[in-house]
Amino acid sequence: MIRLARVPLDRWSALVPALAVVLLAFTWGRSLPSGLVALVACFLAGAVLAAVHHAEVVAHRVGEPFGSLVLAVAVTIIEVALIVTLMSDGGDKSATLARDTVFAAVMITCNGIVGVCLLVGALRRRLAVFNPEGTGAAFATVTTLAGLSLVLPTFTTSKPGPEFSTAQLVFAALASVALYGLFVATQTVRHRDYFLPVTQQGEVLEEEHADPPSARTALISVGLLAVALVAVVGLAKGVSPTIERGVAAAGLPASVVGVVIALLVLLPETIAASRAAARDRVQTSLNLALGSAMASIGLTIPAVALASIWLSGPLVLGLGASHMVLLALTVGVGILTFVPGRATLMQGGVHLALFAGYLVLAISP
C-alpha cells in the first residue's frame, strides 16, 4: 500500500509500541495525575502512528484487498475485548455499552471516514472513483448487519425494552458471523477484482511497483501491529476517566465519552484510509472504512451474545428514535453515493454533515 514498506522497519515504529505497552502496564487500573495523563496521551498518539505504519507494511506485503482487512480486523478484535472487559465490570452503563460502541463505529466509518476519503479523493482528481460492485456489496452488508442487530431489537416484543430474547440474540449472532464470513470470502477469493483500486476510466489500477517487504519484515510488523493496537486501546481506556471528568465538568452527556473513545480507537484506520485516498486509491480507503464498520458489528454482536451467558444484567441493543433517523439517512445517502462508482466534493460534504449531526446529537441529545 505504501512505498515506505520498502525501507527496513524504523526504530521509532518498533520502540514506541514497546514503551507504550510498558507504560500501559504501569498505569492500568490506576488514577492518573494530570502530568501522567499528558505523557499517556503522547504515547497514545505515537502508538497510533506506529499501528498505521505496520499495517501498511503488512498490507503492502499481502496486497489488496487482503491488506485492507489487516487493520480493520485487528482493531476490531481488540475493541471487542475492551467492550467485553468493560461489560464484565457491571454498572448501569454496561447494558448499552455494546450498542453505543457499535453505532459510534458505524457513524464514524460510514460518514466520518468515508466523507474525508471522498473529499480527499475529489480534491486530488476532481472525482473520487471506486468500484460500485465491491463498495455496494460492502455497504449492503453493513446495512443489513446494522438493521438486524441495532434496529430490530427496538421493535421485537418477546422481551420488554429494546432487547432480544435468547433465541433472537442467537440468530443475530449467527447471522452476523455468516454474513461477515461470506463477505470476506467474496472480497478475497471469488470477486477480488471488485475491491481493487480503479482508474478514472474504470480500469483496475496496477499495484505500486515498489518491492514488497520480506516475509520476515512483514511478520515482525504483524507482531508490532498487535502490540501497538493493544497500547492504543489500553491507553485510551486509561485516559477515559480524565475524559469523563472533563465531560462532566463541561456539563455534557455521558455518551460523549464513548464517542471520544471510539474516535481514538478508530484513529489508525482514519489515518490509513486518508493516506490511501491521497494516493488516488479511493477504493482501498473505502475498503478500510466499510470493512471496519462490518467487522465492528460482525464480531461485536457474536462476542457480546456469548459473553451474556455469564454476564449479569440486560443487554440493550435497540437504537433510539434519533439514532435510527441518522442510520436511515446514512443508508439512503450511502446508496446514492456508492451506486454511480464516482463521487464529487458534494458527496463527501454530505457524509461529513451527517457525521457532524451525530456528534451534535451526542453532545445535545
Image (cartoon, rainbow, N blue to C red):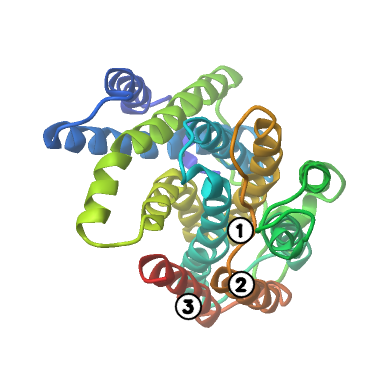
N-term mark: 3 or 1: 1
Residue type at tag 1: Leu
Residue type at tag 3: Gly
N-term mark: 3 or 2: 2
N-term mark: 1 or 2: 1
Residue 349: assigned label:
3
Residue 261 position within the rendered picture, expressed as x and y whole percent measured from the top left? 40, 47
Residue 203 position within the rendered picture, expressed as x and y whole percent measured from the top left? 73, 64
The tally of labels here is 3
Residue 62 position within the rendered picture, expressed as x and y whole percent measured from the top left? 66, 34
Looking at the rendered structure, the secondary structure element under dot 1 is: helix
Residue 330: assigned label:
2
**What's the CA distance linking mark 1 and mark 2?**
15 Å
Looking at the rendered structure, the secondary structure element under dot 2 is: helix
Residue 29 position within the rendered picture, expressed as x and y whole percent measured from the top left? 32, 25
Q: Residue at image x 70%, y 74%?
A: 335
Q: Quadrant of residue 307?
A: top right
